[in-house]
Amino acid sequence: MKAMVYYGKGDIRFEERAKPTILEPTDAIIRMVKTTICGTDLGIWHGKNPEIEQVAREKTGQWNGRTLGHEGIGIVEEVGSAVTRWKKGDKVIIACTAHCGKCENCQKQLYAHCQSEGGSWIMGYMIDGTHAEYVRTPWADNSLYPLPEDLDTDTAVLLSDILPTGHEIGVQYGRVKPGQTIAIIGAGPVGMSVLLTSQLYSPATIIMIDLDDNRLAMAKEMGATHTVNSGKTNAVEEVMKITGGRGVDCAMEAVGYPATFDICQKIIKEGGRLANVGVHGQPVNFEIEKLWIKNMTLTTGLVNCNTTEMLLKSCCSGKLKPGKLATHHFKFSEMEEAYKVFEKAADHKAIKVMLEY
Ligand SMILES: NC(=O)c1ccc[n+]([C@@H]2O[C@H](COP(=O)([O-])OP(=O)(O)OC[C@H]3O[C@@H](n4cnc5c(N)ncnc54)[C@H](O)[C@@H]3O)[C@@H](O)[C@H]2O)c1
Ligand SMILES: [Zn+2]
Ligand SMILES: [Zn+2]
């Protein structure tokens, strides 16, 4: 089968690879129907995760590359002997985070930290992922969702990662409530998912902050009440103007840089929340000397995919309409081209690139 395989910093190859097989009785093999590329895949390609090769060498003594990708929909091809929920031919949505459902962390719905082998986010990272014709999914009973016949397939793909990420780590941890004033920093796929899912809770004012005017214009179409280009203006001053000097109830960081974290901590009002979604590669300057008095809360986290089923229902009913985030469409055979377009997403006005098999 064909797969997009990471070998090292700057080295990914679209090549022939052996079809995966069942390794554990709780596994399933899925024939992929549609997938997408995540910023995390780009990060791996650009050398952000040298641990992938290190861990593989420690565990197996060798390094044969790693198939990228942790999002997508497909058709069940084969199931292990312990899988009870699925059979060959079922159409499924693949969750980016797998979980056993039995360990201490799974009991707390902290699926991102499932303690069992095969649990947590490991697909396209510690095990081969979805940028292939077939993928092995561990803990298949818990980590796949039924794909309804009438759900638009682009929307279904967005349920693998970005919608639960935005909803769980942004909106739920940020405790967005009716009537609130909220700010979202970063109008990429994750920030846009925060924007869409926050509206399930009816905040009154939604301020979107980014450097890219195209993305900000799209955010406005998708429900932002105000937009701020932090490259052209002082974002903190702008937010203070919009909020009458009060700041926001909740700031959700969906970028992962010290500068964007800093905007967030400076615009929170008393009793407010800073929900950090961005993955940070460097320390930030947390201004505890100013914030200790504010009764504020800071949250962090890796997506659990514990609200995927709920979001699936909201998409099916039309309450949640994320389809517009799928801006570019390719055939799976054009994977290399899709990576190039997504790498320069802003230049191509791309949010999510879809690949159909
Ligand atoms: N916590 C989790 O479970 C989880 C899951 C998935 C992704 N993430 C993280 O979420 C973050 C966002 O992901 P994405 O795919 O949307 O990324 P992205 O790179 O596509 O989007 C980031 C956006 O931030 C904007 N930006 C960059 N610098 C800025 C600045 N100084 N001021 C304002 N805006 C700025 C960019 O223009 C871009 O639109 C990443 O850090 C990603 O790794 C976290
Ligand atoms: Zn992702
Ligand atoms: Zn578990």
Image: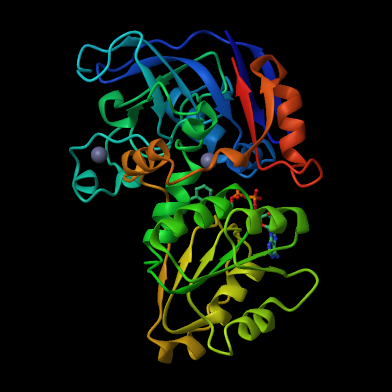
Q: Ligand 1: which quarter?
A: bottom right
Query: Residue drawn at (41%, 28%), measured in percent from left and top?
Result: 94
* Residue 187 visible within the image: no
Nearer to us in this view, 291 or 162: 162
Q: Name the quadrant containing residue 51.
A: top right
Taking the image as shown, residue 292 lies to the left or right of residue 279, namely left
Image x and y of residue 348, in percent: 79, 40
Query: Residue drawn at (39%, 61%), measured in percent from left and top?
Result: 201
Nearer to us in this view, 353 or 224: 224
Q: Which residue ends up furthest to the front in the rendered image?
A: 318
* Residue 197 visible within the image: yes
Taking the image as shown, residue 42 lies to the left or right of residue 149, namely right
User: Vertical placement of 144 versus 183: above or below?
Assistant: above
Image x and y of residue 284, in percent: 58, 71
Query: Residue drawn at (45%, 59%), measured in percent from left and top?
Result: 198
Query: Residue drawn at (76%, 53%), measured in percent from left and top?
Result: 214
User: Vertical placement of 16 versus 126: above or below?
Assistant: above
Image x and y of residue 95, in percent: 40, 34
Q: How many labels does the image show?
A: 0
Q: Quadrant of the N terminus?
A: top right
Q: In which quarter of the image is the C terminus?
A: top right
